[in-house]
Amino acid sequence: MAAPEFITDMEPDAEGVPKPATTVFLIGKECPFRCLMCDLWKNTVETPSPPGALIAQLQSILPQIQHRHTIKLYNASNFFDPQAVPRSERNELARLVKEFELVVVENHPKLMSSQVVEFASQLSGQLQVAMGLETADETILAWLNKQMTLRDYDRACGFLLENGISIRTFILLPAPGVKGDEVVAHTVASVRHALDCGSHVTSLIPLRAGNGIMDWLMDQNVVQLPTLNLVADTFAASIKLPRKKEQRVLLDLWNLAALAGEGVDPVSICNQLEQMNLKQA
Ligand code: SF4
């Protein structure tokens, strides 16, 4: 199996200090959920990974990571789905990342269980569980085929907080079907919901095409990708929301320059957005 890709960027920690954060894209079994906008299956395999494959992938990457601040183990599925990450392998993965200050994994709100708490207890640092809320609009959430309701997300947040586990939330910018003038208010409302539920890191993910169904919906004019200016305006409005000191609102900067229209200088806007991420202002 190929070695996983990884990237390192800077993120403000709970004190607002920029720290290196490395995302490792583990290659495992395809997610059983079928969310409308998801393109993560591109980095998966159809059958369960051979025993030990995820551990071997992580072992191949760790020597290349010089810091021990944040590591994100993203497996393009749900970390606590035993089909994706067998429990026995989770124990070894926990041992391998034990020294990191913050370990982030992705999980669907309906897959919270005592195994999440068990994994957290095996770390010296803090566990953070990332969930795709995408939107706080129930109707759009159902249309996205997330197989979850707002209540499921709220309940998952309560469970994580009760167990001392940190929360990361992904919000789509914009949620599919939300257009034009509505985008800023709609997205800000979703961020507010996540903050109210105690999300420690709420990350805006600019909508992207390329999974087939999203491209078709764009052709039908049901879905529009945001412009870079709209992304900047929405992020600026979201970051102004009242929140606790340790709550951060971030913008995913991946491939953002591609959203720049004619006559827009993507470099200066992207630099500004990066500074807003780091300074949270
Ligand atoms: S739960 Fe996550 S990985 Fe699975 S289909 Fe939905 S967005 Fe993709």
Image: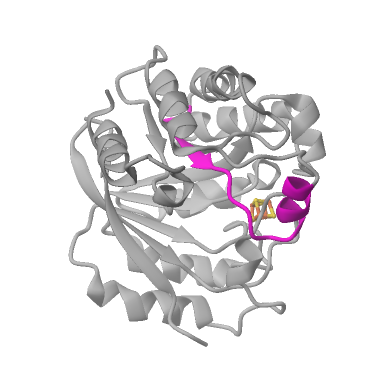
Residue 155, placed above or below residue 28: above
The answer to if 193 sits in the magenta stretch is: no
Residue 219, placed above or below residue 41: above
Nearer to me, 1 or 90: 1
Image position, residue 15 (x, y; %): 22, 30
Residue 177: which quarter of the image?
A: top right
Residue 225: which quarter of the image?
A: top right
Q: Is residue 202 visible?
A: no
Q: Residue at x 80, y 27 (%)?
A: 139
Residue 99 shown left or right of residue 136 in the figure: left
Q: Residue at x 37, y 67 (%)?
A: 6
Residue interval drawn in magenta: 199-219
Q: Is residue 71 visible?
A: yes
On-image quarter of the C terminus: top left
Image position, residue 143 (x, y; %): 81, 38
Q: Residue furthest front?
A: 263
Q: Residue at x 21, y 46 (%)?
A: 19
Image position, residue 36 (x, y; %): 75, 49
Nearer to me, 181 or 185: 181
Residue 72, placed above or below residue 29: above
Residue 247 shown left or right of residue 274 in the figure: right
Image position, residue 266 (x, y; %): 34, 44
What colour-coding does the image apply? one colour
Q: Residue at x 46, y 42 (%)?
A: 261
Q: Residue furthest bottom?
A: 1
The answer to if 202 sits in the magenta stretch is: yes
